[in-house]
Image (cartoon, grey):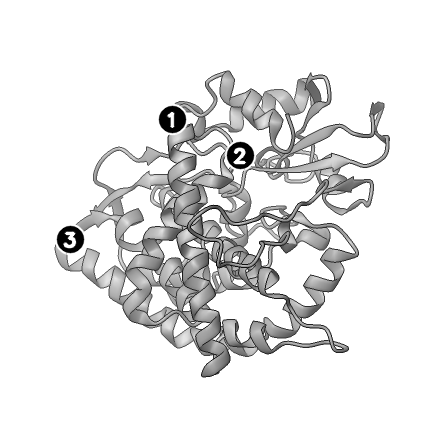
Amino acid sequence: MGPLGAAIWLSRLGFTQSEFMANPFPIYQEWLAERPIWEVEPGQWLLFRYEDVRVALTSAAFTKGEAWTQTPPEGYRHLPDLTPSLLMSDPPVHTRLRGLVTQAFQPRHLKRLEPFIVEVARQFSDRVVADGEGELVSQFAFPLPAVVIAELLGVPRADHPQFRAWSKQIVRLLDPSQSPEARQNAMEARWQLLDYFHHLIAEKRRAPADDLLTELVQVEADGDRLAPGELLAMALLLLVAGHETTTNLIPMGTLALIPHPHPRPEDDWHDPVEELLRYTSPVQLDARLVAESISLGTVTIPGGSWVTLVLGAANRDPSIFPDPDTLNLSRHPNPHLAFGRGIHFCLGAALARMEALIAFPTLWQYEWRLAGEPLWNENIVLRGLTALPVRLG
């Protein structure tokens, strides 16, 4: 069944239903206690326990599996073949790509963005405040990170609305339970965006600018550069890495904070943001191929098996996090796995944290209350809300 095959198995049990997505954690606690390592069918395993998930994220015995180059379909044959991204590659390919990208992904790019993020967050929140109520996902949580990653990459501001529309479609590809029609629409949006990036990259070669896409075009190490197909794959990965976690964290975190005492806007939000990442777990699942048989506790997983890592369960493991189902905004230390661990640690983690550290204090200059029922998505990989009606309290 392949990567995240166990996630498809879960969806067959109806676990993409809104009741489960709204609160999967009681079931996770049951599985943590009764079957922390679960072979759901031959060659497909689920890992729930923190330590097992951590090992799978960091051990060389677990890989991303065989990667392949993708040839563009009819209508996009002018694009270069798409090579495996950082997300889907193993060393030594991953080591080379990460080394090149790390050079381009300089802290100065994020620092340059900070005033822009502050201003955009204020604009979006002011619109909701002016009406006294609104819908937080469409009016704040989705557009904020979409606009920010577009600005970081160097997408012209006139193109931001189209960029956001493509983003909304493409993230559906990360959920194996999506319908064939939804996946087809998402794939078409993906190729449209790649075609856009192809032309934008050519423009950056002609007229370099102070943005991340220009840096990726120019980056070099020991005479090595990113090939055209690698540049496209990297731009697409950065879109997802810099967008989806924040989009889901902001409304889920707000929903968790509404009934809870919370910091003031001027307080230090670092520990609260880390706790909201742990508590909400925007990325619920990841997957690895077992390259060679490995023992986890008393269980041996054969080589060639696929394991689905349930990050949402690992982040509620009571052996690591005391009283794990309680939102503790002063929890420290907080070794959550919301951004993964090891060589595939989320490339967009620093950006997501910066956005959250701006977004939450901006929102919580005011008191918010629910103005209707939250609506949960049915994305079993990327847990989040599709709507969060709020009003000033």
Secondary structure of the residue carrying numbered label 1:
helix
- Name the image quarter holding the N terminus: top right
Residue receiving disc 3: 132
Secondary structure of the residue carrying numbered label 2:
loop
Q: Which of 100 and 347 is in front in this view?
A: 100
Residue at the left extreme, as displayed: 131
Q: In the image, is 48 to the left or to the right of 380?
A: right
Q: Which amino acid does label 1 sit on?
A: Ser
Q: What residue type is labelled 3?
A: Gly
Q: In this view, does 315 lie above or below 21?
A: below
Image location of residue 77, percent across then percent down: 49, 54
Tell me where residue 172 sits by quadrant: top left
Whichever of callouts 3 and 2 sits on the residue coming sooner in the sequence is: 3
**Local crowd at mark 1 within 10 Å, few (<14), some, or many (≥20)?**
some
**Alpha carbon separation for disc pair 1 and 3:** 28 Å
Residue receiving disc 2: 325
Q: Which residue is drawn at 68% across and 17% down?
A: 34
Q: Is residue 194 above or below residue 387?
A: below
How many numbered marks are there?
3
Secondary structure of the residue carrying numbered label 3:
loop
Mark nearest the camera among 1 and 2 is: 1
**Alpha carbon separation for disc pair 3 and 2:** 32 Å
Q: Is residue 178 above or below residue 82?
A: above
Pointer 3 with pointer 2, Cβ within 8 A:
no
Image location of residue 267, percent across then percent down: 44, 65
Q: What residue type is labelled 2?
A: Asp
Mark nearest the camera among 3 and 2 is: 3
**Local crowd at mark 2 within 10 Å, few (<14), some, or many (≥20)?**
some
Pointer 1 with pointer 3, Cβ within 8 A:
no
Q: Which of 49 and 286 is in front in this view?
A: 286
Q: In the image, is 198 to the left or to the right of 156?
A: right
Residue receiving disc 1: 18
